[in-house]
Image (tube, rainbow, N blue to C red):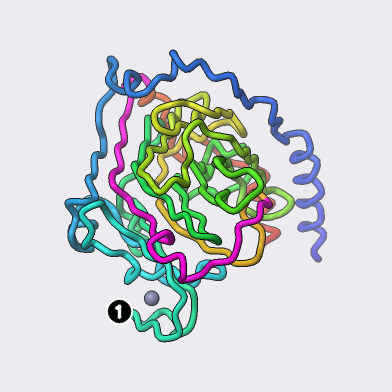
Amino acid sequence: MKKQKILAIALASVILIFSLSSCKADRFDIDAAKYNYPSLVSGDGWESTMDVDFASITSMEELNKNYWYSVKHGLRKYEYWCPDMIDFSSSDGLVIHSVQSENHVCTDELCPLNGVFTGGIDSRDPTTGEGFYQAFGYFEVEVKVPTGDGMWSAFWLQSTNTGRIGKKGMDGSEIDVYESSFKNSSTPNSLGNAIHYDAYDWPFYQSHGAVSTTENNPYDGEFHTYGLLWTPKEYVFYMDGKPYYATKFGGVAKIAEYLRLTVEIRTGVQGPYSQDIGEFSNDFGAANDFVIKSVKVYQKDEYKSEIKTLDDMGWSFLDWAYRLFKK
Ligand SMILES: [Zn+2]
């Protein structure tokens, strides 16, 4: 290892130790009156920026016209993400099926014959990078989460800058608006929320997750709404219009991000919060389906002046050191 590299790592480690974020910012006694939805977004200064009714969308082409795209085709972890798993024929909404198959032949021939197949949608075209991005506002989906064992659906926001280091996630954080993977766990009736930043790579990567018990049961086979109020100062998470968890972890992201609705599958291993997620099986049938009815996004006038670009964030020594190390 070059001396220059060793020096960069040593300095980066010292800076990192002094810059580690505290988790004390979490607030669980949320002022429901202050954060009440829908009175929140119908108030002064709010405007609608996205309103998609997925039940009315009948083709991939129409989906793309609404700034939604199939997620990147191919192997995710254990499962494959395949556009052929998206079904436009239901009057309930967009359905993402999950199956185990020994004879899977997909349109682009990017999947093997044998495997576990599911999918998802992004508001960013994985090929061109074009799409719908927003910093701050209120983001809400109405979905029916899959309830079969081994299933893990999520609504999350992602940044194209999450791989950058040293700005406490203000330059880009993964924001998990909800993760539904507790049906088979010791704490059913729960949702997970997490913030991740700085490259998912030791020793820089930072994340903070929380599991909350919700008033309504996400796994009752019914439609529910899941929301995020992202202000320049905090993230507040909602189920069925009621706030249940908030955090300021990191420094709160300031740059526009894209939206993701995805399904992951695990079988016989732990879920994202070290919980028992169960064994995936085709026998669960329609319970494995993820049904997406709508996505609504709003922006508030007063947040707009707080939106930053990557240039606004400036140079980061840690990012420079990280890139040097990765070479
Ligand atoms: Zn495929």
Residue drawn 28% across the image and 56% down it = 94
Mark 1 C-beta closer than 8 Å to ligand 1: yes
Q: Which residue corresponds to the image point at 52% horizontal and 26% vertical from the top-left?
A: 234
Q: Is residue 154 magenta?
A: no
Residue 277, horizontal then vertical, whole percent: 61, 57
Q: Is residue 299 magenta?
A: yes
Which is more toward the observer, 169 or 261? 261
Q: Would residue 247 be found to the left or right of residue 296 on screen? A: right
**x%, y% of residue 240?**
40, 32
Secondary structure of residue under mark 1 = loop
Write the residue at 51% across / 59% down. Answer: 151
Q: Measured along the vertical axis of the image, is residue 288 above or below residue 319?
A: below
| Residue under numbered circle 1 | 107
Q: Quadrant of residue 47?
A: top left
Q: Quadrant of the C terminus?
A: bottom right
Report the label total: 1
Residue type, label 1: Thr
Where is residue 55 drawn, in percent x and y?
Answer: 21, 51
| Quarter holding residue 168 | top right
On the rendered structure, is 213 left or right of 24?
Answer: left
Residue nearest the observer in this picture, 229 or 28: 28
Quadrant housing residue 289 = bottom left
Q: Is residue 14 left or right of residue 101?
A: right
Looking at the figure, which quarter contains the N terminus? bottom right
Taking depth in this image into account, of 288 and 194 the one nearest to the observer is 288
Where in the image, quadrant-wise, is ligand 1 located?
A: bottom left
Tell me where the magenta segment starts and ends, as one range: 274-302
